[in-house]
Image: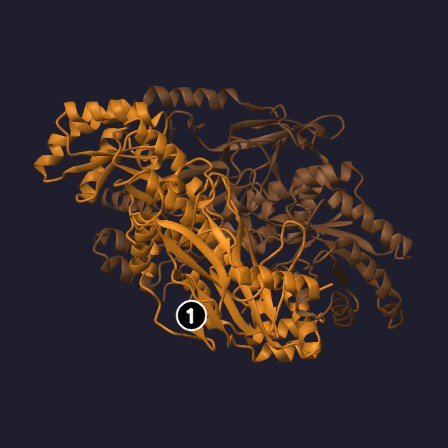
Chain colours: A orange, B brown
Amino acid sequence: MIDPLRSPLLTDLYQLTMLQGYFDHGMVDTAVFEFFIRKMPPKRGFLLAAGLEQVLEFLEGLRFGDDELRWLRDSGRFNRSLINGLAGLRFTGDVYAMSEGTIFYTDEPILRVVAPLPQAQLVESRIINILHYQTLVATKAARCVLAAPGKLLVDFGLRRTHGAEAGIYAARASYIAGFSGTSTVVAEPIYGIPIYGTMAHSFIQAHESEETAFEHFSVSQRDNVVLLIDTYDTEVGATKVVQLAPLLREHGIHIKAVRIDSGDLLEHSRRVRAILDHGGLVDTGIFASGNLDEFVLHRLLASGAPIDGFGVGTRLDTSADAPYFDCAYKLQEYAGIARRKRSEGKATWPGRKQVFRYFDHAGLMAEDELVLENETRDGEPLLQPFMRDGRRLDPATKLNEIRERAHTQLSRLPDRLKAFSDTPPYPVRVSDAVRKLAARVDAEQI
Amino acid sequence: MIDPLRSPLLTDLYQLTMLQGYFDHGMVDTAVFEFFIRKMPPKRGFLLAAGLEQVLEFLEGLRFGDDELRWLRDSGRFNRSLINGLAGLRFTGDVYAMSEGTIFYTDEPILRVVAPLPQAQLVESRIINILHYQTLVATKAARCVLAAPGKLLVDFGLRRTHGAEAGIYAARASYIAGFSGTSTVVAEPIYGIPIYGTMAHSFIQAHESEETAFEHFSVSQRDNVVLLIDTYDTEVGATKVVQLAPLLREHGIHIKAVRIDSGDLLEHSRRVRAILDHGGLVDTGIFASGNLDEFVLHRLLASGAPIDGFGVGTRLDTSADAPYFDCAYKLQEYAGIARRKRSEGKATWPGRKQVFRYFDHAGLMAEDELVLENETRDGEPLLQPFMRDGRRLDPATKLNEIRERAHTQLSRLPDRLKAFSDTPPYPVRVSDAVRKLAARVDAEQI
């Protein structure tokens, strides 16, 4: 059985046709590939790295099973040198990377793979697939966190993520960025991420009346009563909550919050707050959801909306205003010689690179420098070794440590890069050595 | 072991908290939920249904394993009535749906689930997750097919899809819509979708010269030689291809096509076509890729770009100009009584519904009508039974039949709906019976 979601055949066909060429011609020397983002998407001042853990797991587990090898043979598309090459293939290379939860900028490699060419080539598609999406969501989630400081933020996006894995990765990436948790249940047993959930409109609708639905839900939940009040009329719903509260109080049940999921959230939250306060429910919070993203959060809170928490879903998990990054995993060196792609608008910096970060007197990020691996600097080197000869150097970093790292990184970000509109780019200097190497490669490569 | 990608815990927590309420209060009567899209995204005139097969597989396989039940117990969050209810839970309901490959419009249900309330509720998150994404990609892919009639179209998007499953679903959905195939290898063993692939820039860069890379690749591939010519300079690359051709011809190798992946595709394709023709390679095609979508395809071909095939990737597989649909899976009936959500901007039509389609004299779609299930009409009824008592009525439809259906459907689409700009909406009439039912539900539901 081929598990399509975990198979090494979850790759682009050209990886296999290229590998055939490499094996046919004995091109199995050491290759160096780096993953980086070429262009900052609109209205973003920084990027937040995520997904490394899943890349390392993928590399550790890389192997072709019997069914995959049989399919390769039976397809008639590949020759014996490829199939033999894949049969025993394991990832035996080195990986250098920025820790997850690190802030980075365009053209900075966040991952470097050093391995025999066929291995380093084969893993391209899936490495990009993993890093691209988690970094996409982590970056947008970090912006939501900046837009709603101190508020409860919960990932609500599973249903409109692009497939199962996106749902799980979105929960992970948003948690790293500072979300309190997710509604996606399986994220708790798998990653230990706190999960949150209330009720859907169908729960209300299934009951004969909204009042009965509120009562049934409260009795069943007791410690976690959040009532959805917008199924029919938001303010009427809030009034019913006030009426129900004394009865519940007799049974020791406190209404933690009400949820609003439609309409003008600013207006509704104000009216609902007034109804709750007037009814004595000053300790009952307001939780809002529906078409939220960092821009809406920022506007709502700037307008003083009395909302205590937000369920952020579709627009976060699809990164709706920028649903992809222009990113690449490019060959920078082969057999000891630096390489460079020069395609229009897609030229790369050659060689094995490191990124140093410099801070100002206040401890804020001031400038980064892209250097060759062997250049030394006083700044903080951002790429560190994670895997040597196909084995991890350390156990997986705990998710809460990654989250803590992201939090610290965000606290060292200059204010201008936290803006929700286009900002002047963060300065990333390219060292003379990198520039000279590029010029030399250009001169030699015709 | 919990497989997070296939676990029934891949759902929103509120499904479980609601189920606890349902089980606590014996609410296990028959519920009817329908999935539909609320709003047409910008610049789209129609929608193309996809994903039903995976929904049926999900429903057939739904069960809580020992590890999932243990986690539910150990979490301390759920009571015994929920855990017992989930322990033996199987999907025992009925499913009505539009066949995959059917064109549909907003507010038309493409799936109806009729099942005991807890079952029908629990499956909401994953059903939306599957149908939403595949329909999103199928719709955009169909527009690419309309933009490039007769051209070879290949899904190239795996690396920037949102996770593994999105990569696989995108291959499937775009094939249904009329793409020739995909670059995602595993789509062939799993779905029988034709796969296509050439080479990456790294293959060229890994060689000492572009010429050697072209030669190595051609010798290894023989029958499938497509050469990527834009690594350094597109036109120089084309000239090298012309120079290499006689040598390859001696070995019986024909250069099927060259690929251009950067720059102004119209200009480059014209110049490259001239170079190839002048060099006698009139049978060597031009294949283009890089930032393509239906808008770019339409412009390129309207300008007469001499391009024979396209690799369409990121913008297709993320549906970049509309990365999500406003869609919903809503309770329409419970315990024999029609239900309706009235939230602002999100009101639904109650009851079990059918969609009839009417055609004009030329056989083109003229109008649809949303009716109650028991209303009869002369038009074509679009929803059909697929599952009864949790069992499929027929074996899975072959993918090529679905693809054929989509092709026929697209041929019956009026021209105005194929436009690449905003179009007047296709008329979907709502029957008097549906309207009356809605009014009655509103009057009864306070």
Question: Can the viewer see residue A44 in this picture?
Answer: yes
User: Which percent across, then down, holds residue A378?
Assistant: 38, 62
Query: Which residue is nearer to you in this view: B409 or A372?
Result: A372
Compared across the picture, whether A306 is left or right of A46 comes to left
Instruction: Answer with the quarter of the image where residue A414 lies.
Output: top left
Compared across the picture, whether A248 is left or right of A30 comes to left
Q: Looking at the image, which residue is at 85% across and 69% down?
A: B248
Q: Looking at the image, which residue is at 68% across and 79% down?
A: A26
**Amino acid residing under circle 1:** Pro
Query: Which residue is nearer to you in this view: B227 or B95?
Result: B227
User: Which percent across, then down, holds residue B38?
Assistant: 49, 31
Compared across the picture, whether A262 is left or right of B173 comes to left
In the depicted structure, whether residue B436 falls above or below residue A249 = above
Numbered-mark total: 1
The quadrant in which the N terminus of chain A is found is bottom right
Compared across the picture, whether B111 is left or right of B48 comes to left
User: Which percent across, then down, holds residue A412?
Assistant: 33, 49
Instruction: Answer with the quarter of the image where residue A401 lies.
Output: bottom left
In the depicted structure, whether residue A228 falls above or below residue B202 = above
The quadrant in which the C terminus of chain A is found is bottom right
Q: Residue furthest left?
A: A250
User: Which percent across, then down, holds residue A343?
Assistant: 67, 54
In the depicted structure, whether residue B402 falls above or below residue A331 = above
Element at label 1: strand
Query: Which residue is nearer to you in this view: A175 or A233?
Result: A175
Query: Which residue is nearer to you in this view: A113 or B58?
Result: A113
Which residue is label 1 attached to? A385
How many residues crowd around disc 1 within 10 Å: few (fewer than 14), some, or many (20 or more)?
some
Chain letter belonging to callout 1: A
Question: Can the viewer see residue B408 in this picture?
Answer: no
